[in-house]
């Protein structure tokens, strides 16, 4: 839901928090994920219209479940195909089975199905893009229009993506249950990865005029907090939440008055969110000391080292390099290598960093990626190769689809003396 049209922040926050719980209650009770999700969206809209004028009900969750249940049962009753199925089984089913349950029947209202719903939206049959879209719609409570705006695509395109995702889930025949124990770790890994993707897209949007989308980062943090509440002893959940808040702590200093990008080394650290930093450091410290090590915890530890340095020159680069080497051992990927090259350059010199970067030239996953050009240009600039750095910055600027990044890279190239 949106704060537009007179919806107060308190109402909006309540609706966002209750969305997965209400949808989970309907899907558990009635099935029909697709129809249930539409009914919940209608209930959210009704609440957004009525609550600001009439006041929030004493039990907003129950109110939403009741309204959504009525919408859903009305829809199901009018479905001719369903009517035909009911007629077909009428002679076999007890009469009571043909009655639509009342909104008061079913699971207790205090049951929180958020995690089950996340597993459903992040089903392995879906692509990552579909997982993200369906999670934001069904669990985050965003409208299709809001998701489309966040990803700078037409609303019709996003609507089709969400619709196809729901149909794919239906075709997969997945029940509204937790995954079996044998699949738990992998399925949870996918859920956390989807939340990580949502946060990253919000923190540095891949295209468009703005560097970040506060709506997406806020949703990612909120949903990760919900998972953390349900899985308080999972170290990687805590690590992901720590990584998000430690990274988001720097957001107030990442852009200048005109929206221009300000790199980490040049940011005014007095603007960083000290409460987020305190929370993130506490989360990752506890996770590292009590649970098995995972990649999100290591990334959070790296972010904590950056955030705890009072000045850029005080950054403990040897510790960061050690953490990146550890991360590379347990979760190797080209982005880890890319970031590790910067740490190597800060500890052992730019030429050493450039040697590590050369390993990525043959990696198809990095082919044409603007970040590889940008990091190489930065290290060439550190090494005194101005011509090479200028060419690298310009190549990166051509390849990025983010306007703030493009302007920053073009400016870096222009400031290098000939």
Image (spheres, grey):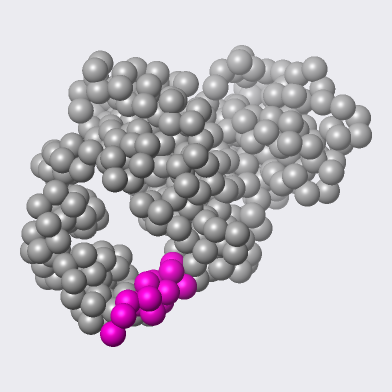
Q: Quadrant of the C terminus?
A: bottom left
Query: Which quadrant of the structure image shows residue 281?
Result: top left
Q: Position of residue 345 (x, y in %)?
A: 16, 56
Q: Report the residue at 18% width, 37% height from top.
A: 319
> In the orientation shown, which residue stands out farthest toward the right?
53
Please name the residue shown 35% across and 33% down the image. Answer: 308
In the rendered image, is residue 120 in sight? no
**Depth order, front residue of 404/89:** 404
Up-down relation of residue 72 to residue 264 (above or below): above
At 70% from the left edge and 50% from the top edge, which residue is drawn? 80
358, 107: nearer the viewer: 358
Q: How many marks?
A: 0
Please give left or right for residue 395 compared with residue 194 in the image: left
Q: Position of residue 249 (x, y in %)?
A: 47, 39
> The N terminus appears in which quarter of the rendering?
top right
Q: Main secondary structure of the magenta part?
A: helix
Give x and y (percent) for residue 12.
71, 37
Residue extending furthest toward the bottom: 418
Q: Is residue 319 visible?
A: yes
Q: Horizontal placement of 297 versus 241: left or right?
A: left
Q: Is residue 408 magenta?
A: yes
Q: Which contiguous range is marked in magenta?
A: 405-418
Q: Is residue 172 above or below residue 229?
A: below
Residue 292 drawn at (x, y percent): 20, 23
Note whether 234 is above or below 218 in the view shown: above
Q: Nearer the viewer, residue 155 or 241?
A: 241
- Quarter residue 334 falls in: bottom left
């Amino acid at each position: 839901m949106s704060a537009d049209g007179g919806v107060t922040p308190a109402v909006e926050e309540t609706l966002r928090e209750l969305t997965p719980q209400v949808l989970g209650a309907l899907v558990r009770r009635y099935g029909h994920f697709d129809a249930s999700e539409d009914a919940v969206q209608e209930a959210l809209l009704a609440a957004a219209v009525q609550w600001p004028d009439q006041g929030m009900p004493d039990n907003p969750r129950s109110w939403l479940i009741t309204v959504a249940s009525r919408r859903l049962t009305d829809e199901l009753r009018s479905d001719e195909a369903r009517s035909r199925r009911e007629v077909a089984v009428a002679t076999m089913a007890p009469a009571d089975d043909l009655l639509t349950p009342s909104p008061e029947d079913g699971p207790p209202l205090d049951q929180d199905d958020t995690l089950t719903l996340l597993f459903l939206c992040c089903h392995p049959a879906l692509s990552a893009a579909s997982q993200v879209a369906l999670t934001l719609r069904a669990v985050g409570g965003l409208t299709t229009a809001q998701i489309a705006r966040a990803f700078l695509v037409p609303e019709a395109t996003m609507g089709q993506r969400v619709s196809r995702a729901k149909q794919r889930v239906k075709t997969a025949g997945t029940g509204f249950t937790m995954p079996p124990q044998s699949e738990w770790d992998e399925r949870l890994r996918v859920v956390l990865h989807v939340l990580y993707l949502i946060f990253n897209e919000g923190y540095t949007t891949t295209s468009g005029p703005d560097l970040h989308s506060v709506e997406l980062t806020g949703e990612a943090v909120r949903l990760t907090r919900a998972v953390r509440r349900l899985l308080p002893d999972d170290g990687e959940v805590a690590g992901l939440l720590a990584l998000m808040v430690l990274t988001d702590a720097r957001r107030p200093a990442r852009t200048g008055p005109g929206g221009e990008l300000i790199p980490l080394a040049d940011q005014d650290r007095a603007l960083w969110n000290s409460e987020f930093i305190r929370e993130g450091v506490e989360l990752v410290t506890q996770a590292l000391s009590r649970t098995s090590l995972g990649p999100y915890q290591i990334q959070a530890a790296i972010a904590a080292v950056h955030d705890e340095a009072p000045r850029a020159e005080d950054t403990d680069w040897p510790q960061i390099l050690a953490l990146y080497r550890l991360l590379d051992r347990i979760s190797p990927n080209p982005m880890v290598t890319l970031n590790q090259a910067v740490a190597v350059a800060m500890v052992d010199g730019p030429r050493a960093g450039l040697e590590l970067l050369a390993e990525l030239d043959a990696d198809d996953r990095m082919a044409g990626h603007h970040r590889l050009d940008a990091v190489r240009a930065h290290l060439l600039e550190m090494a005194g190769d101005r011509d090479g750095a200028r060419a690298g910055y310009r190549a990166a600027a051509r390849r990025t689809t983010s306007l703030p990044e493009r302007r920053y890279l073009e400016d870096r190239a222009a400031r290098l003396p000939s």
